[in-house]
Every structure is written in C-alpha cells, then in structure tokens.
C-alpha cells in the first residue's frame, strides 16, 4: 500500500518523529511504500477559499508553496497518516493548514485507510481527543 505520513511537528527529532519512525519500520517490514513529509516547519498556508481549484484549475491549488510537493503524493496515497503533537488542545497550525488544502481535491481517489497519531505532554482530556477525532472524521467524510 502507498502510505503518506504528514508529521506536523516542527521538531525533526521530536516525539512525533520517533513514533513515525517506529511506524515506518514496521510498515516497511510488511512491504508498504512510505512517503513522509515533515511539515511542521514548511511553508504551507491555509486555504484562501478562492475556489479556483474547483472552478478553473481542475483540482489544483493556486497557492505555490510547499504543499505543491505533497499534492502529487497525496493523489496516489492509499493510506493517509496524520501525526501531530497536541498544541493548545488541538493539532499544530501546520497540520491544520495542510488539512484545509485538501479542499482542492473532490476526494482522494485511492484512499482506503486513514490514521492519526496525536502526541501530548499531559494536559489533554479524553473529551478533547474525542473532539479532535470528530473534527478529523468530519473533514474526511466531507472532502475525501
Ligand atoms: C505551543 C505548544 C502548545 C502545547 N500544548 C499542549 C497541550 O495543550 N496539551 C499537551 O498535553 N501538550 C501540549 N504541548 C506539549 C506537546 O504536545 C508535547 O511536548 C509533544 O510531545 C511535542 O511533540 P514533538 O516532540 O513531536 O514536537 C504543547 C507544546 C507546545 C510547544
């Protein structure tokens, strides 16, 4: 399976990266192909809601930032892994921006599975995890 991992931490050797590395090792052992993007310190902006992707650009985003390197891999991915530290009871800003930019697609045509890993220090309540889960599920149900 083609697996795309988005790591929303800005720390290349942080806790999220350590968890992602374990996931990659195990997934490769059973023959999956992995693409991983550490996006926590990349130039990825939020959606501008110009709707060019749906009106004139045939599913392509008008913004020329680091998301452009991810879009072709995203189109081909069969499994999408969102890995993010918890920042102020939510995902990191960069992961949020990347999720907003999925708006350019009507759906991810090959997607079969999705996972998310959320890293925290201490103060996230179960209720908060449920909220984040609902938020991600809704996005995927609506857009992917
Ligand atoms: C700006 C900021 C906000 C944070 N907010 C929370 C939080 O609300 N709850 C929590 O448990 N940890 C919070 N943390 C701690 C991180 O989630 C935790 O250190 C995480 O393991 C960092 O992952 P990383 O090493 O992959 O960057 C916060 C850290 C930062 C820098």
Image (cartoon, rainbow, N blue to C red):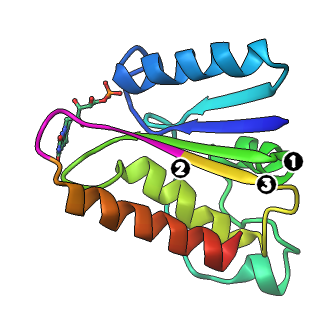
State the residue lying farthest toward the left.
123
Q: Is residue 122 magenta?
A: yes
Q: Could you tell me which secondary element the residue under label 3 belongs to?
A: loop
Q: Disc 3 to disc 1, how far (Cα)?
A: 11 Å
For ligand 1, give the image quadrant: top left
Residue 72 x %, y %: 83, 47
Q: Earlier in the sequence, mark 2 or mark 3?
A: 2
Residue 115 x %, y %: 58, 46
Callout 2 touching callout 3 (CB < 8 Å): no
Q: Disc 2 to disc 1, how far (Cα)?
A: 20 Å
Q: Which residue is label 3 attached to?
A: 112
Q: Which residue is label 2 attached to?
A: 44
Q: Earlier in the sequence, mark 3 or mark 1?
A: 1
Q: Could you tell me which secondary element the residue under label 2 belongs to?
A: loop
Numbered range of the magenta stretch: 116-123
- Judge whether 121 appears above or below 91 on screen: above
Nearer the observer: mark 2 or 1; the answer is: 1
Confirm or reject: label 2 Cβ below 8 Å from ligand 1.
no
User: Viewer-proximal residue, 127 or 7?
Assistant: 127
Q: Which residue is label 1 attached to?
A: 76
At a point 87% along the width and 62% down the height, the residue shown is 109
Label 2: few (<14), some (14–19) or many (≥20) C-alpha neighbours in 10 Å: many
User: Viewer-proximal residue, 97 or 124?
Assistant: 124
At a point 62% along the width and 32% down the height, the residue shown is 37
- Judge whether 82 appears above or below 13 on screen: below
At a point 78% along the width and 70% down the height, the residue shown is 107
């Amino acid at each position: 399976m083609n697996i795309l991992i988005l790591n929303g931490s800005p720390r290349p050797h942080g806790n999220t990266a350590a968890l992602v590395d374990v996931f990659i090792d195990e997934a490769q052992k059973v023959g999956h192909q992995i693409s991983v993007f550490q996006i926590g310190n990349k130039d990825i902006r939020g959606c501008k809601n110009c709707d060019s992707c749906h009106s004139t650009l045939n599913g392509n985003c008008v913004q020329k930032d680091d998301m452009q390197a991810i879009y072709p891999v995203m189109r081909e991915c069969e499994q999408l892994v969102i890995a993010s530290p918890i920042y102020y009871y939510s995902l990191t800003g960069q992961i949020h921006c990347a999720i907003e930019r999925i708006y350019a697609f009507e759906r991810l045509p090959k997607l079969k599975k999705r996972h998310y890993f959320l890293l925290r220090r201490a103060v996230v309540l179960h209720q908060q995890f449920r909220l984040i889960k609902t938020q991600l599920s809704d996005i995927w149900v609506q857009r992917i």
